[in-house]
Amino acid sequence: MKNYSIVFLLFFTSCSISNISRQNSQNIESQESSAKVSFYLTKTSSESIPLLIPSVMNPNLSPNSSSAVVLSIGQQVYFKYKGKKYILIEVDKSIKKGDKIEVSELLKKRKEELGLK
């Protein structure tokens, strides 16, 4: 009977440790996805650029302007071209607090990558 108790105890402990490890992994992933970064979307060209940031805002970047944003890692910023929505940038860990992202140049590059215009 003692052998069954020991086997059960070892099995139960193993399951508990596995469950705790899985919960810790999920917590870390959740923290990473909810991490936010503060940076600037700047624009040096002479035309306005409307952007779409779902569940945050839809800024219209004015000519020669800079807009501060605080976005979550993984958040996508879109632009529209001929009525269709395209990803301009996805916020990731490479974007650091205070970075300035030149939207005019980025938009030109993305349009080329997507074969637009």
Image (cartoon, grey):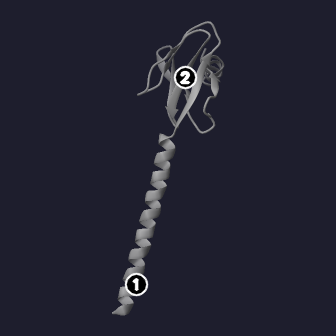
| Percent of width and height locating residue 13 | 42, 75
Q: Amino acid at mark 2?
A: Ala
| In this rendering, position of residue 20 left or right of residue 43 | left
Q: Image height check: is 37 above or below 78?
A: below
Q: Quadrant of residue 43?
A: top right
Instruction: Tell me the crowding category of disc 2: few under 14, some 14 to 19, or many 20 or more residues within 10 angstroms, Cα based.
Output: few
Nearest the eye: 37 or 5: 37
Question: Between disc 1 and disc 2, whose residue precedes?
Answer: 1
Q: Disc 1 designates what residue? A: 7
Q: Disc 2 designates what residue? A: 68
- In the rendered view of the protein, which quadrant contains the N terminus? bottom left
Q: Residue at x 45, y 53 (%)?
A: 26
Q: Nearer the viewer, mark 1 or mark 2?
A: 2
Q: Image height check: is 76 above or below 106?
A: below
Residue most extreme to the left: 1
**Circle 2 SS class:** strand
Instruction: Tell me the crowding category of disc 1: few under 14, some 14 to 19, or many 20 or more residues within 10 angstroms, Cα based.
Output: few
Whether residues under marks 1 and 2 lie with C-beta atoms below 8 angstroms apart, the answer is no
**Circle 1 SS class:** helix
| Percent of width and height locating residue 38 | 55, 30
Q: Residue at x 42, y 64 (%)?
A: 19
- In the rendered view of the protein, which quadrant contains the C terminus? top right
| Percent of width and height locating residue 29 | 49, 49
Q: Image height check: is 17 above or below 31?
A: below
Nearest the eye: 110 or 25: 25
| Percent of width and height locating residue 28 | 50, 51
